[in-house]
Image (cartoon, rainbow, N blue to C red):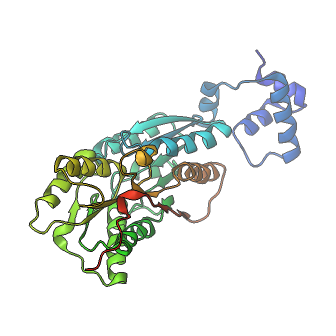
């Protein structure tokens, strides 16, 4: 196996220069760095992660903390992060916080203990405490949700716009008693998707009924329970907007249990366009998020911080799109 000395000898540089190139030190002359990389490729040199971590006090590992591994929204996002990380020579430690702030906090400690070069976080709520990471100068980028107390780089999907598109579409198709099943208002996704729901009503001059708004954790069981409460109302909704894919599944189960027909008895639009959305009967109208690009862009921001970017916090906003199918396209009715 080739050694770092072999690389240095082939490139005509010192071993210290090779080490700096391996650690992405921006102070190395570009021409020297190119010669080192050519020598690395020619010799098929594989650097020791253990040795690199001893010299830099940081491993070549990122910690990726997601809020709920059961949510099918996340695999494409994780793939986006992983592809960018791998191309830059980094590996991932994937952590599942189960939407629990205490579990999430324990992973911050893990990132410090494992000398992670950076952390990508999908926060369980907007009040996450990054103090242990900030104290160790570990760069953090959040994805999908904002934080209130820490102004860090983040990549978001325009939740207000996506929810407004979904609910406006239902209103345009003749629905008027439109319910909202959303996540906790303490999370930016829950609050922003509710804000889009309200905005669509206000713009169309349609009343919002507080009894038709249900909140809970972003889970299938919460979606099911919320839908059952809505269907038990004396004046039940004629359409539903669900704020994530797991809640949508729960709501669909409750509608089926009640013997109701979509969209004749109740229309539905979900947030997140999953692979199964076109397979259910009728096919589900949903808001599609660019989940792969969400992960990739988050990883790019983290990589730039690791490589020396020291500017102010950046926010990247990605646009969702409404995929119209049959679950919401009831012929317009006169009211």
Q: Quadrant of residue 36?
A: top right
Q: Is residue 311 visible?
A: yes
Residue 270 can be seen, yes or no = no
Give x and y (percent) for residue 257. Answer: 18, 46
The percent position of residue 302, horizontal first and vertical second, equals 58, 50
Q: Residue at x 43, y 58 (%)?
A: 325
Compared with 25, 146 (above or below) is: below
Rendered image quadrant of residue 69: top left
User: Residue 287 location in percent, x, y?
Assistant: 44, 59
Relative side of 71 to 226, left or right: right
Q: Nearer the viewer, residue 176 or 150?
A: 176
Is 20 situated left or right of 32 in this image? Answer: left
Quadrant where the N terminus is found in the figure: top right
Q: Residue at x 41, y 37 (%)?
A: 95
Q: Position of residue 318 (x, y in %)?
A: 54, 62
| Residue located at (53% from left, 53% from top) | 294
The image quarter containing residue 327 is: bottom left
Q: Is residue 20 left or right of residue 169?
A: right
Q: Is residue 242 left or right of residue 227?
A: right
């Amino acid at each position: 196996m080739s050694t770092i000395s072999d690389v240095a000898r082939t490139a005509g540089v010192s071993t210290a220069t090779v080490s700096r190139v391996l650690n992405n030190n921006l102070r190395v002359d570009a021409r020297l760095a190119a010669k080192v990389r050519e020598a690395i490729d020619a010799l098929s040199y594989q650097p020791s992660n253990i040795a690199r971590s001893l010299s830099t006090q940081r491993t070549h590992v990122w910690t990726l903390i997601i809020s709920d591994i059961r949510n099918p929204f996340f695999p494409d996002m994780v793939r986006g992060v992983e592809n960018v990380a791998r191309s830059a020579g980094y590996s991932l430690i994937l952590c599942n916080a189960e939407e629990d702030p205490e579990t999430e906090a324990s992973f911050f400690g893990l990132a410090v203990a494992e000398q992670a070069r950076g952390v990508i976080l999908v926060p369980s709520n907007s009040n996450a405490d990054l103090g242990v990471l900030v104290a160790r100068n570990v760069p953090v980028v959040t994805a999908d949700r904002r934080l209130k107390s820490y102004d860090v780089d983040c990549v978001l999907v325009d939740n207000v716009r996506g929810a407004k598109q979904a609910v406006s579409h239902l209103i345009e198709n003749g629905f008027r008693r439109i319910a909202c099943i959303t996540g906790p208002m303490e999370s930016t996704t829950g609050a922003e998707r509710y804000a889009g729901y309200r905005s669509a009503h206000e713009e169309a001059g349609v009343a919002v009924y507080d009894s038709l708004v249900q909140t809970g954790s972003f889970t299938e069981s919460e979606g099911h329970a919320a839908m059952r409460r809505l269907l038990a109302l004396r004046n039940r909704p004629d359409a539903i907007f669900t704020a994530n894919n797991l809640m949508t599944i729960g709501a669909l189960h409750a509608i089926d249990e009640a013997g109701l027909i979509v969209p004749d008895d109740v229309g539905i639009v979900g947030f997140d366009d999953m692979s199964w959305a076109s397979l259910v009967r009728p096919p589900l109208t949903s808001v599609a998020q660019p989940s792969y690009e969400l992960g990739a862009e988050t990883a790019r921001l983290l990589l730039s911080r690791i490589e020396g970017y020291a500017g102010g916090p950046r926010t990247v906003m990605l646009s969702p799109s409404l995929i119209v199918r049959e679950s919401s396209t009831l012929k317009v009715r006169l009211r």
